Image (tube, rainbow, N blue to C red):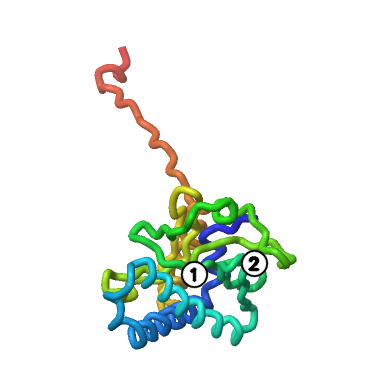
């Protein structure tokens, strides 16, 4: 099962502001509770703690919303939207790649070749990525489709739907324009005949 960027954008559009709000609240809660102690922890510990806060806020969100659910598989937290999309909340780097230990499970997820145990329907795996500054300030939230090597495509989401509605319109407009393109006919070239050649002998 594969969904294009356009299909994902359309299906998840109404969720974008909710995702951003939940992740914002998680970062703010972490800053309130833990930022003063940051210097005492390794960067890995800080990232793991922030991720726990993100999981908590998203778990609350998904239990409140129709069409949303949470799934924990081998201690890995995933949110399911409409039984079709499995989003893994992850901190991402500047290339929008999530940091994962390369296990057979992770590889199968990135190859869209993994079934969540106990879930009847097939799902399309995506990363719900959040990018942080060196001071752990939120710089962006993204929907990312990853493969084993790279971020294949991404959508930067925000607290409003305006940009994403425009994205959907632009993609639709491109399709319409491509379908209705009329290629210009070649101009006919007329060869001029000199007056001397047209005179009667």
Helix, strand or loop status at disc 1 = strand
Query: Image point 31% across, 12% down: which residue?
Result: 201
| Number of numbered labels in the structure image | 2
Query: Image point 74% across, 66% down: which residue?
Result: 120
> Eyeballing the image, is 40 above or below 173?
below
Tell which circle, 2 or 1, labels the residue nearer the N-terminal end.
2
Helix, strand or loop status at disc 2 = loop
Q: Mark 2 sits on what residue?
A: 84
Query: Which numbered tag is attached to residue 102?
Result: none
Q: Position of residue 16 (x, y in %)?
A: 48, 76
Q: Mark 1 sits on what residue?
A: 89
* Dot 2 alpha-carbon crowd within 10 angstroms: few under 14, some 14 to 19, many 20 or more: some
Picture quarter containing residue 31?
Answer: bottom left
- Of 12 and 19, the residue lying toward us: 19
Picture quarter containing residue 95?
Answer: bottom left
> Eyeballing the image, is 33 above or below 121?
below
Q: Is residue 191 left or right of residue 76?
A: left
Q: Are marks 2 and 1 in contact (CB under 8 Å)?
A: no
> Eyeballing the image, is 4 above or below 44?
above
> Eyeballing the image, is 89 above or below 179?
below
- Of 165 and 96, the residue lying toward us: 96
Q: Position of residue 124 (x, y in %)?
A: 61, 61
Extreme front residue here?
40
* Dot 1 alpha-carbon crowd within 10 angstroms: few under 14, some 14 to 19, many 20 or more: many
Q: Is residue 87 left or right of residue 95?
A: right
Residue 64 at least partly seen = yes
Q: Quadrant of the N terminus?
A: bottom right
Residue 160 at least partly seen = no
The Cα atoms of the two marked residues, 2 and 1, are separated by 16 Å
Picture quarter containing residue 38?
Answer: bottom left
Query: Image point 44% across, 82% down: which residue?
Result: 21
Q: Position of residue 87 (x, y in %)?
A: 55, 67
């Amino acid at each position: 099962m594969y969904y294009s960027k356009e299909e994902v954008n359309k299906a998840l559009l109404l969720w974008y502001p909710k995702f951003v709000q939940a992740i914002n609240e998680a970062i703010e809660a972490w800053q309130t509770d833990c930022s003063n102690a940051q210097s005492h922890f390794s960067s890995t510990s800080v990232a793991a703690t922030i991720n726990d806060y993100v999981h908590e806020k998203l778990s609350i969100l998904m239990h409140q919303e129709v069409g949303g659910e949470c799934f924990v598989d081998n201690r890995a937290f995933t949110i399911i939207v409409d039984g079709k999309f499995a989003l893994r909340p992850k901190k991402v780097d500047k290339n929008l790649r999530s940091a994962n230990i390369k296990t057979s499970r992770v590889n199968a997820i990135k190859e869209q070749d993994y079934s969540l145990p106990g879930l009847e329907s097939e799902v399309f795996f995506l990363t719900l990525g959040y990018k942080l500054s060196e001071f752990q300030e939120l710089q962006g939230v993204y929907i990312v489709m990853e493969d084993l090597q790279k971020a294949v495509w991404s959508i930067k989401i925000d607290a409003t739907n305006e940009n994403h509605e425009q994205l959907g319109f632009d993609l639709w407009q491109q399709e319409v324009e491509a379908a209705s393109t009329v290629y210009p006919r070649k101009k006919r070239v007329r060869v001029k005949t000199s007056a001397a050649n047209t005179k009667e002998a």
